[in-house]
Amino acid sequence: MTGRRFLILFVSFFSFGFTTPGNDKLPNEQLYTLFSRANEAFRQAHSISDNSDKATKLYEEAILIYEKIIIDGPIQNAKLYYNLGNAYFLKGDLGKAILNYRRAEKLDSADTNIQKNLAFARSRRVDKVKLKTEKRVLHTLFFWHYDFFLKTKFVLTCLFFALFCVSLTVMIWVGRIAPVTVITVISGLLFICLLTSVVLEANNQARKVCGVITVEDVVARQGDGQSYSPSFKDPLHSGTEFDLLENRHGWLHIQLSDNSEGWIPESSADLI
């Protein structure tokens, strides 16, 4: 429990304006009432100093209400998933915590609280899957593509495009002055690089499906059945993230960050 004190544990308040269209959604008054109940259960649980059964039950109550809001609301809101991730983490369910932090990140990748809590939860995982050497080199060389948020890159793309247009206009009107020419060339190159990065990441987000293992441990196999040999020496544990390659007959064909692959039962993981 000591390490959990480093987690950012503030409960977010938000507007219910961001909803998924539907005819059977709960009225706003009921949503606010449920949300208040969930927050109160979370606060009561967090105020209990020891990891007692009472705290666990209160976290479970908060989780059930948050999930009811998400399913029956229906609500699509990063802060709600963030709250749910916090409740799961403090309950001791690392897999569901990372799953909901990732869902929150998908809706608001620039939120620093989400990023910090996700990074902290990842540090608590049993499985330490490292990037392949080739990927590490790419991440170092093209850090701006991998480290910058999509929104940040989009804003920078617009800024460098504006700078390129202004400097090009100045260069046309006053001639090829060295400083203006340098600014035009550099801003043009940065605009092209960032635009390429935005297009690639947006396309990747649209087609790539990711998931998180949510059971305590699961044996990844070389095929879609229990009769196949294990893919790894040790089982995979709760909180391990993966890219989905294929879904077949209740089995998921997954790829880890080191490009290793395996098949796990569909019931052992949730997709983001």
Image (cartoon, grey):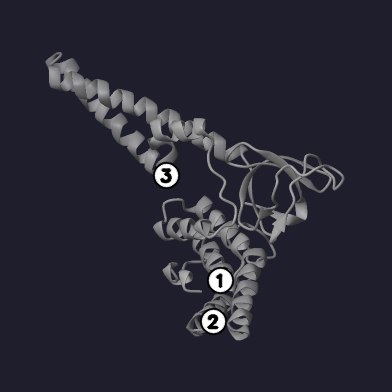
The residue singled out by tag 2 in the image is 45
Q: Secondary structure at mark 1?
A: helix
Taking the spot 56% from the left edge, 36% from the top edge, the residue there is: 204
The answer to whether residue 264 is above or below residue 15 is above
Residue 126 or residue 106, whichever sits in front: 126
Furthest residue to the front? Answer: 233
Furthest residue to the top? Answer: 175
The residue singled out by tag 3 in the image is 149
Is the C-beta separation of discs 1 and 2 under 8 Å? yes
x and y percentages locating residue 135 in the rendered image: 50, 33
One can see residue 76 in this view: no
Determine whether, in the image, residue 194 is placed left or right of residue 204.
left
Q: Which mark is residue 87?
A: 1
Kindly report the distance in space between the C-alpha atoms of the residues bearing marks 1 and 3: 26 Å
Determine whether, in the image, residue 249 is placed left or right of residue 120.
right
Location of residue 161 (image quadrant): top left
Residue 219 or residue 111, whichever sits in front: 219
Q: Earlier in the sequence, mark 1 or mark 3?
A: 1
Is the C-beta separation of discs 1 and 3 under 8 Å? no
Q: Residues within 10 Å of mark 1 (few under 14, many from 20)?
A: many
Label 2 vs label 3, nearer the camera: 2
Location of residue 215 (image quadrant): bottom right
x and y percentages locating residue 78 in the rendered image: 51, 59
One can see residue 231 in this view: yes
Q: Residues within 10 Å of mark 3 (few under 14, many from 20)?
A: some
Q: Secondary structure at mark 3?
A: loop
Is the C-beta separation of discs 2 and 3 under 8 Å? no
Residue 160 or residue 272, whichever sits in front: 272
Under mark 3, the amino acid is: Phe
